[in-house]
Amino acid sequence: MKLRQRAAVALLALCALVLSACGGSQQPPSNQPPSGGGQQQQQQEPQGSAEPKEIVVYTSHQADIHEPLFKAFEEATGIKVTPVYAATGELFQRMRAEANNPLGDVIFGGGAETHEANKDLLQPYVPKEIDKLAPGTVAKDNSWTGFTALPIVIMYNTNLLTADEAPKSFADLTDPKWAGKIAMPDAAKSGSAYTTVVTILHAMGRDDGKGWEVMKQIAANAKILASSSQGPKGTNDGEYAVSLTHEEAAFKYVAAGGPVGIVYPAEGTSNVPDAVAIIKGAKHPENAKAFIDFMVSQQMQEYVAKELNRRPVRTDVAPPEGLEDVSKIKFLDYDMDWAANQREAVLDQWKDIVVQ
């Protein structure tokens, strides 16, 4: 059975499970995941709320990610989702322009440091099962909640490169032999690309200028793309030999049997989650809270791990089969506060590099 068909079957089963829990139906199937009290509560009508059963979700997730998740939420809660899709940077620009009259309720997607840098646009919320979420996956002030963990990786096409030929580090990508063979999204538009840039700075020298020298050389070798999905797809298709991306974007092609391999950079990598948050002044705040609780519930985190091949943020959910164990990955001491506070300065320098 193809990956998308298998995911659809699993999603239908999950929706039936959640609906039966909500309606107090007959004996559940034997393969039903355990359901916690938080999950039971979130299926109910938001308490003390006269909100219409609708929500507007701004999302940078691709359709193959957000469509099944939104469908599951609608099936389980009866709350209709109206999605607005754009790149992370564009969504936050829109939110800032709409600050006096927000048209969205939730921002879903984009690296947590992008949310952190724009926390004045977000409404803090403590998820119902916050005790089940891994350390570092919820903002210190609860302005955002992590959805999945996303290490930055080097993805390569196995038809074009052997494992020995593939780059092993960020430093390797500075070699002129990679000119025109590397794909990377524009950090001014893509949240994952911004995380990639800051990860390279942390790995190669954030404060002494050495990181920017490496970044400049990598950018000179790279095709800078408008969308974060173009690089992984192009690498899978053989258009590029290498792509700088996050783990999930690469692993979904591995899981589908594509000709790709994954390298965790030798210098170390980051593990910044993508995030979900309530937009300040949202017109449907109770529905927005239910949305966040649903996306980090045990059942949905199990679904995204098994069917969407993403690392969960819950400590009680196993990662997808086939992913590198976290104990074997070298993680950098990634300064989230620095990444958020220096965002404008980093992007200004990035733009100077790209336009040269």
Image (tube, grey):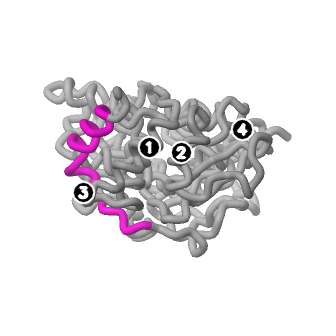
- Whole-angstrom CA distance, mark 3 to mark 1, is 23 Å
The three-letter code of the residue at mark 1 reads Gln
Q: Is residue 162 visible?
A: yes
Horizontally, residue 78 falls left or right of residue 64, namely left
Earlier along the polypeptide chain: callout 2 or callout 3?
2
The residue carrying pointer 3 sits among few (fewer than 14), some (14 to 19) or many (20 or more) residues within 10 Å by Cα, namely few
For residue 245, which numbered disc appears in the image? Answer: 2
- Whole-angstrom CA distance, mark 4 to mark 1, is 42 Å
**Residue placed most toward the observer, 40 or 171:** 171
**Residue placed most toward the observer, 42 or 243:** 243
The three-letter code of the residue at mark 2 reads Thr
For residue 217, which numbered disc appears in the image? Answer: 1
Q: Look at the numbered disc 2 and give the secondary structure of its residue.
A: strand
Residue at the (56%, 69%) spot, across then down: 329
Q: Nearer the viewer, mark 4 or mark 1?
A: 1
Q: Look at the numbered disc 3 and give the secondary structure of its residue.
A: helix
Q: Nearer the viewer, mark 1 or mark 2?
A: 1
Q: Nearer the viewer, mark 3 or mark 4?
A: 3
The three-letter code of the residue at mark 3 reads Trp
Q: Which residues are magenta?
A: 332-352
Q: Which residue is mark 3?
A: 338
- Residue 60: horizontal and vertical position, in percent? 45, 34
Earlier along the polypeptide chain: callout 4 or callout 2?
4
- Whole-angstrom CA distance, mark 2 to mark 3, is 21 Å
Q: Is residue 51 visible?
A: no
For residue 8, which numbered disc appears in the image? Answer: 4
- Whole-angstrom CA distance, mark 1 to mark 2, is 17 Å
